[in-house]
Image (cartoon, helix red, strand yellow):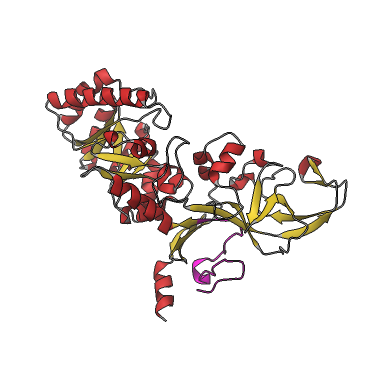
Amino acid sequence: MATTNAGYTALPPQLTPVGLRSTRAIIDLDALETNVRAIRQSLSPGTNLIAVVKANAYGHGSVFVARSALAAGASMLAVAATNEGVWLRRHGVRAPILVMGPVDDSQHLAAVENGLTLALHSIASAKHVNEIAEESGRTAHVHLKIDTGMHRYGCDPEDAAAIATAIAGMRHLWLEGVFTHFACADEADMAKTEEQAAIFDICLAVIEAAGVRVQMKHAANSAATLRSRRYDYDAIRLGTSMYGLAPSEHTILLPGMRPVLRLISKIARISDLKPGEGVSYGHTYVADQPERIALIPCGYADGYRRILSNRGWAAAGDEHLPVRGRVCMDQLIVGLGEESSLAVGDEITLFGDGTDAAPTADELAVLIDTINYEIATSIAARVPRVYMKTGQIVAVDDLTGPVDLSATTQESRSR
């Protein structure tokens, strides 16, 4: 495959009938697999790794992230909604998939028919899933979610044993797992997390005392996994840290772990401002001296937040490019330095992995008072995800659907 001067790799035209936008997310699958393996190797013996690929794999694209996570040692996937699991099934992912969030009764049939594992919290929901499974001639795998202090989805701890016993007695359900979720594992003080774990331990003991055997018990998210082996149980759920994003300032990634995603674009136009001329809607930026500016085809509809107007910055290598004026729906403007030699078609980085002057997701999050999760998950579906492995493009995912180019790449290498 040929590589252009701007660092873009040419794609086989027959596989990209509409081409790709200049604005694209570059996903480093080598980094993702490194991150998964680093966590996998740190776990207690016998502990499984559940790769969380909800919200389109935290904005990274669920299909190819799921495949890479499984290749690196994950034994199960987790999503938040039924359609996320069905999407993976339709694109050839056959590994177990846990739907962690509440599921409307109308979605139980699709979940069961696609072999998704459902998280249940009541006898009523269990009965409905059991009926659907019976009508479909299947056995549905389910996990019982216990609310130990998050006060979100899950059953009350005092009801856990009764619900588990009821599920275990339903002919078309298999109670594969029991789990909970920590509310404060990314905080400096782990006392609340330990309180939740203690409640979970009691629930597990009561469930087992009732004669219900559970294969998979899990509680730890990324933060708890990075903090202590105390919370490993039978499996951990690896979310944000799989993508090289630390859950908080109190949780440090393991050595070798690094961000997976860069959001890049190309300069579409260069123009000059005279003193007193304004930029973009409302002219919230007015030049006080002659200035050269560059148009970038990326806006808040792509996930580059409008709140970054006159606050964010991009980069070309070590060249700092401040955002000038309001971020528009589809475009934004950056300022070029006096000595800049950038030209139309040159690549810029909107946020990256910290290897150049571009902000990281962490830095943008601090700038607008949010979290790195939101920066990554905000990237819109219309932004193509371009997947790299050993320096080569191996897949693309955009509104036209995921395309695996690895076979094409391998063929070109053998010539």
Residue 312 placed where, x, y %?
66, 44
**In percent of the image, x 30 and y 40: which residue is there?**
236
Quarter of the image with the C terminus in it: bottom left
Image position of 4 (left or right of 208): right
Q: Residue furthest top?
A: 158
Judge whether residue 5 is colored magenta. Answer: yes
Is residue 298 among what the camera can see? no
**In percent of the image, x 55 and y 52: which residue is there?**
352
* 7 vs 310: above or below: below
* Residue nearest the viewer, comparing 73 with 42: 42
Judge whether residue 140 is colored magenta. Answer: no
Residue 71 placed where, x, y %?
32, 56
Image position of 382 (left or right of 309): left
Q: Residue furthest front?
A: 255
* Quadrant of residue 241 within the rendered picture: top left
* Dominant SS type (magenta): loop
Residue 374 placed where, x, y %?
52, 39
* Residue nearest the viewer, comparing 251 with 18: 251
Number of marks present in the image shown: 0
Is residue 78 among what the camera can see? yes
Image position of 163 (left or right of 82): left
Residue 195 placed where, x, y %?
31, 22
Range covered by the magenta-colored residues: 1-26
* Quadrant of residue 268 within the rendered picture: bottom right
